[in-house]
Image (tube, helix red, strand yellow):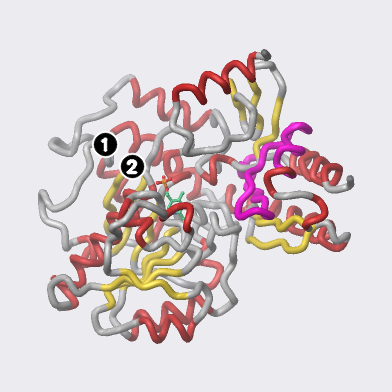
Amino acid sequence: MTATEDLIAAAEAHSAHNYHPLPVVVSTADGAWMTDVEGRRYLDLLAGYSALNFGHGNRRLLDAARAQLQRVTLTSRAFHHDRFPAFCAQLAELCGMETVLPMNTGAEAVETAVKTARKWGYRIKGVPAEMAKIVVAGGNFHGRTTTVISFSTDPEARADYGPYTPGFEIVPYGDLTAMRQALAENTVAVLLEPIQGESGVIVPPEGYLPAVRRLTRERNVLFMADEIQSGLGRTGRTFACEHEGVVPDVYVLGKALGGGILPVSAVVSSAEVLGVFRPGEHGSTFGGNPLACAVALEVIAMLRSGEYQARATELGAHLHRELHALADTGRITAVRGRGLWAGVDIARAYGTGREVSERLMDRGVLVKDTHGSTIRIAPPLVISEEDLDWGLDQLRVVLAG
Ligand SMILES: *Cc1c(COP(=O)(O)O)cnc(C)c1O
């Protein structure tokens, strides 16, 4: 057996099989490249589902983490620590908001948003006890907790985990009429991804997000944007909502906020909305810890410069031009996305998404398939144009046969 086969067999022997990884075993990584245990190099066109927007081993982020490791890493929120005020103030400022509630994983931030909306509904909007309703979109991906999968439409994510949390209504993504009809007296929030990532990088019809913004404002309903994957530079703006001039009431952030080093997530909103929490009513042992704050502060500083957003815009235009050219050959049936982010539907004759991903792996390029025939391309924003072109060359070769 090769070292790779050995390690995969060992992993399979002692881990739950809740993933089906490509058969590559990574041991080191730098920038947009990963190296496996046998010394083969791979271009990373997944970037940890956008958790690695700034690339592997980013010097600025590692320096920030190292410096904080020497000082203090965890206090719990039972005590104050000196990184917390700047983290909250600077993240709020980046979002154009007032108040931050830090958590760790994305799913926890979504849970926090759900709790925020319900409490806001009961304490501020005046919804009768136990009656709060949250409207979500079909095809959503908001995480893996029991409540969050309760409003998933993906049978794989949801089956056999009942009984499910009530209080959610699902409407088709991009359907404004359905959204209008779903908003009722007891609706406290609409929770949407401005671009649906896991669903295959689905961009809603132009005008949908601004219309939902108007509707929610008229009906006194919170608009909560899950920008965990779409936010923090990926689409060419700090937030995907910005492309349509939309400012939500609540941002839900995660993934890239932790710089690919540790999980950092947050709910960011107004002082009024997040003011619904009183001491003891919500929390997390690790949420807002000093190490997380130090890394996130560097992420925020990097985003403040605008250089990563500009890169995503420029390289993204290039990526989409090249993919559309491939679509003209009939090998690709659809290309969606914004910025350095694309969902690519492979024509049936050229294999499933998984088969294409495996053939790309054999040629040194790592992507992830989704929903059968789709591959998702989301390189680190620090990728060079030459490397991106090389990756696209491999895709052309793989789809030639
Ligand atoms: C990844 C993701 C989540 C869940 O984040 P985890 O850190 O995996 O819990 C939630 N929403 C969106 C849009 C995501 O892409």
Real-space Cα separation, disc 1 to disc 2, in angstroms: 7 Å
Mark 1 or 2, nearer chain start: 2
* Quadrant of the drawing holding the N terminus: top right
Graded by Cα atoms within 10 Å as few (under 14), some (14 to 19) or many (20 or more), the crowding at tag 2 reads many
Q: Give the residue number, with chain letter if any, for mark 2.
A: 104
Q: Is residue 104 magenta-colored?
A: no
Q: Cβ of disc 2 within 8 Å of ligand 1?
A: yes
| Residue 239 horizontal/vertical position (percent) | 49, 59
Q: Magenta segment range?
A: 356-382
Q: Is residue 234 left or right of residue 278?
A: right
> Considering only vertical position in the picture, is 36 above or below 291?
above
Going by the numbered disc 1, the residue's amino acid type is: Phe
Q: Is residue 361 magenta-colored?
A: yes
Q: Give the residue number, with chain letter if any, for mark 1.
A: 286
Evaluate if marks 1 and 2 touch, with contact meaning CB atoms under 8 Å apart: yes
**Quadrant of the image occupied by residue 384:** top right
The residue at the point 61 percent across, 51 percent down is 370
**Most distant residue in the front direction:** 160
Q: Is residue 12 left or right of residue 315?
A: left
| Residue 61 horizontal/vertical position (percent) | 47, 32
Q: Cβ of disc 1 within 8 Å of ligand 1?
A: no
Going by the numbered disc 2, the residue's amino acid type is: Asn
The residue at the point 54 percent across, 46 percent down is 50
